[in-house]
Each structure stands twice: as structure tokens, then as C-alpha cells.
Amino acid sequence: MRSILLIEGNQQHEVYCADSMELLDKVEADIIYLDPPYNQRQYAPNYHLLETIAKYDSPDIYGVAGLRPYDEQKSTFCNAVTALRDLEIIAKEGNYKYIVLSYNNEGIMKEEDIHKVLEKYGELKLIEKSYSRFKSHNRTKNAVKKVKEQLYILKKYV
């Protein structure tokens, strides 16, 4: 494996490999973009190969799929209660001018709950776009055929 080529520019930027909750009091930014899980399934197992490439390590793997351990990467956004709690912490304590949350109308955090949390901390705008649902087992007449992707844009009070 070769190291990647880095192209330098004249804009300042920073990249972190950390839990976003740990960065709240360390990072100041104009915008934070959040794209948390919409359901109870953890993301980490889906990206175990990319994680291994990025870390350039040789983890002890387990299971038929050869997964790397991911207990320390479990997202609190895969649980409705802890997701809303942490969204509020980010909105309240994060040093950002704008928070952009990408979500969908079938996520474990309900739209009205997201509104209740975010609108306390600034001016909230919601943009929605309908998409056709993809589900391999979605063959029934009564199945919902559309899902709404939602973009919550919060301009925080100063």
C-alpha cells in the first residue's frame, strides 16, 4: 500500500478522527454537518474494510465476515433517546454558527422531536426532498413507496 498524494491549497482546513462529542469544546467552525444513522443498525461493521485501509493496521478479526472490533465506535445516534440527548448537546455546546443535519422522515428521531431540540438554539429551516424507497422486499401494494430526505439547517443564536 502506498501513501496518498496530498494536494496543498491556500485554504485552512482541519480533519479529525474522533468522536464528534469529544470535539465540542475543542473546535470552532462556521458549519458542522451531521449525517447520523437513521436506525438502530451501527455503521461501523459496514465499513470495516475501509477502516482497516485507513488505519493501515492488522486488527484481530472475528465472525464469518471478518469484522474488526467496533465497540468503541458505536454511535449513540442508533438509539432514539441518546440520539436526541446528543443532538441537544451538540446544538447547545458546539461552537458553530450553523448546524446542518441530514436525516429522513423514517428515522428513529421523530421530526417533531428534532424541531423541539433545535429550535431552542436558533432559527431553524427544514428542506425536504422525496425519493423513491429502495427495499428489496418491498413488493406489497400497501408499502410506502416514497421517503423524505430532510435537511435541517439551524442558524444558531449569537
Image: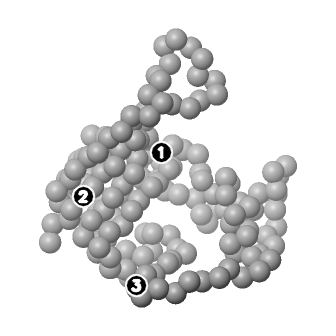
Of helix, strand and loop, which one carries label 2? strand
Q: What residue type is labelled 1?
A: Tyr
Which residue corresponds to the image point at 44% horizontal and 28% vertical from the top-left?
A: 146
Q: In which quarter of the image is the C terminus?
A: bottom left
Q: Is 153 in front, or is 64? A: 153
Above or below, comparing residue 21 to residue 62 in the picture: below
Q: What residue type is labelled 2?
A: Leu
Q: Can residue 21 be seen in this view?
A: yes
Residue 115, which numbered label? Answer: none
Residue 121 position in % (x across, y down): 19, 61
Query: Is the image coloured rainbow, by chain, by secondary structure, or in one colour?
Result: one colour
Q: In this view, does 124 lie to the left or right of 11?
A: left
Q: Residues within 10 Å of mark 3 (few under 14, many from 20)?
A: few
Query: Mark 1 or 2, which is nearer the eye?
Result: 2
Which residue corresponds to the image point at 41% horizontal and 59% vertical from the top-left?
A: 34
Q: Which amino acid does label 3 sit on?
A: Gln
Q: In which quarter of the image is the N terminus?
A: bottom right
| Quadrant hosting residue 33 | bottom left
Above or below, comparing residue 92 to residue 15 in the picture: above
Q: Is residue 109 visible?
A: no
Residue at which label 1 appears: 38
| Quadrant hosting residue 56 | bottom right
| Quadrant hosting residue 118 | bottom left
Of helix, strand and loop, which one carries label 1? loop
C-alpha distance separating marks 2 and 3: 25 Å
Above or below, comparing residue 76 to residue 135 in the picture: below
Residue 154, which numbered label? Answer: 2
C-alpha distance separating marks 1 and 2: 19 Å
Query: Mark 3 or 1, which is nearer the eye?
Result: 3
The answer to whether the residues at label 3 and label 1 have Cβ atoms under 8 Å apart is no
Residue at which label 3 appears: 11
Residue 92 position in % (x across, y down): 26, 66
